[in-house]
Image (cartoon, coloured by chain):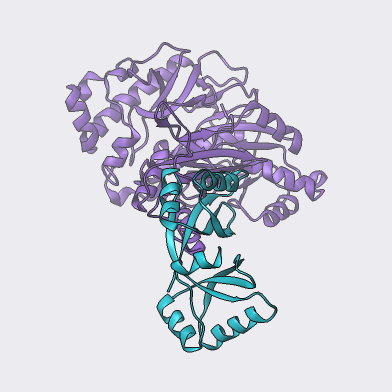
Amino acid sequence: MGNYHHPEIETMPREDIEALQSARLVEAVERVYNTVPAYRKKMEALGVEPRHIKGIEDLHLLPFVTKDDLREEYPYGFLGTPLDDVVRIQSTSGTTGRRVVAFYTQADIDLWEDCCARAIVAAGGTKKDVVQVCYGYGLFTGGAGLHGGAHKMGAMTLPMSSGNTDRQLQFMVDLEATIIACTPSYAAYLAESIHERGLRDQIKLKAGIFGAEAWTEEMRHDIEQSLGIKAYDIYGLTELSGPGVSFECEEQAGMHICEDHFIPEIIDPKTGEVLPKGSKGELVFTAITKEAFPLLRYRTKDITQLNYEPCACGRTHVRMHKPMGRSDDMMIVKGVNVFPSQIETVLMNKGYPANYQIIVTRVKTSDNIEVQVEMTPEMFSDSLTEVSKKEKELVGALKSMLGIYCDVKLVAPKSIIRSEGKAQRVIDKRNLY
Amino acid sequence: MNIQQISVFLENRPGAMAAFTKLLQKNNIDLRALSLAETENFGIVRVITDDPMTTVQVLKDGGYICSLTPVIAVAIEDKPGALVDLLDTMGDAGINLEYTYAFLAKKANSACIAFRVTDNEAASRLLAERGIKTLGQEDLPALFE
């Protein structure tokens, strides 16, 4: 039995959780119906009114919200409060360069940070701890979330963001960081640096909270061995606040979803039908307490399974398995969401035909993404400088669109393998699932 | 007066050059000059052949991306100092080279220098003023008999 940040909530009996969810759902549906025209329109199209939703048993009657909906309604279509009440935005990438903007009132920030605080406490954190936050700070929710969570549970927060290894390790040693929060691949990278510099005996880390990208049990084992810590998984998405929607406890057997804020469902991605408890399928969340950006039945496109069995840690909130795949073609590379369609858009804007292939590999601990583009007569000239410049321009355009550097390789025409006339657009050699 | 050089896009990988030259051989195209400029991922092969038009057709049919680039070519004596003299003259005339390569002619005692400049017309004129004749495509066969 570990510590809990919110003991009564985290160990609440199942029937009380469900009663709370039902009460909050009814109130949320009423609120969203009256303040979010884009969602009201969807409900009206199905003939569903707030009075039809009497509890969680009626959740399946409500329409879904998808990333495409958010993209179409960018930026304010799903805003649920007056802008005056909004104190923050965070942002994540959309499918063709249209970003998703999430809005937060102060209450939204508080509930999000509370969830992250629960995660840190579940990882053994207390006021005495020093939490080194190496997720990116800024629009990305990783830094902001864990930073706020560390504040809320009273640890000393080191707002490092990522990068600058020298500084990371200097503070890690000098300020005796005990908990680290970053992406698993960054953790692996830091671990290597620590060993290279012979600092292993000088670090005081006991736990790490890792997320924002897929990582295997094997990677967990490697990080735990390498740093001598216990490595905890954390999950979330910007559309639902950020990290902290679910988190692992000391059992490391699934992530507890903060069910007092987010109601999970598992659906068949093709039919939208809600699947029986324990089935594997697409994870859908209904945010029942968020104000400025309250999404009901948001399709995450992550494939997972829910485990309602009691957990030895004493938490009664349902656990989700690490995501087991995606029901769309999104990838997470270097911690950033990447859709092949974004790459296609860049190529077409630059006047290239969409004959490309994306190859993602992991070299030691970091992701590498290579975009192979078939050469065309229009792109070619006798000048090496000119053609190289075109390659560089593409690198720049892709960086602008995706936020990460891709290697660009111009290849001979018709060299991208086509089977049955269709080119395989994405080759992901990382074996993450 | 220009020579038609054929520039071809090649991937930087083993076998690329072999495949390219095989295609030329299969079509009985006679290579007169060859140079390869590379970057990390790809290269541009520049060739002078006995029949530029056929070469372009053969390459395009073979799935290659290529273009015709007019370059200046000068025949010099194949003896020490000849190249220095030519390049000195060009430097004095203010002609800037983008790239250059040399190749031997079959004709006794002759070597050819091909070079790409920004303005072929101007370069030809400047060289003519200094008594240096630039070669045309039709001058090549005589050098290679």
Q: Colour of chain B?
A: cyan
| A315 shown above or below A125 | above
| Quarter of the image that includes the C terminus of chain B | bottom right
Residue ID at (56%, 36%): A211
Residue A178: x and y, percent?
70, 42
Task: Indicate whether A204 appears above or below A399.
Answer: above
Q: Is residue A377 placed above or below A323 in the rendered structure? A: below
Q: Residue furthest top?
A: A276
Q: Is residue A400 visible?
A: no
Q: Which residue is at the front of the view, A311 or A426?
A: A426
Q: Is residue A351 visible?
A: yes
Quadrant for the N terminus of chain B, please. Answer: bottom left
Depth order, front residue of A428/B134: B134
| Residue A130 location (% of width, % of height) | 67, 46
Q: Position of residue B53 (x, y in %)?
A: 41, 55
Write the residue at 35% across / 52% down: A351
- Residue A65 on image: x %, y %: 31, 31
In the figure, what tint was chain A given? purple
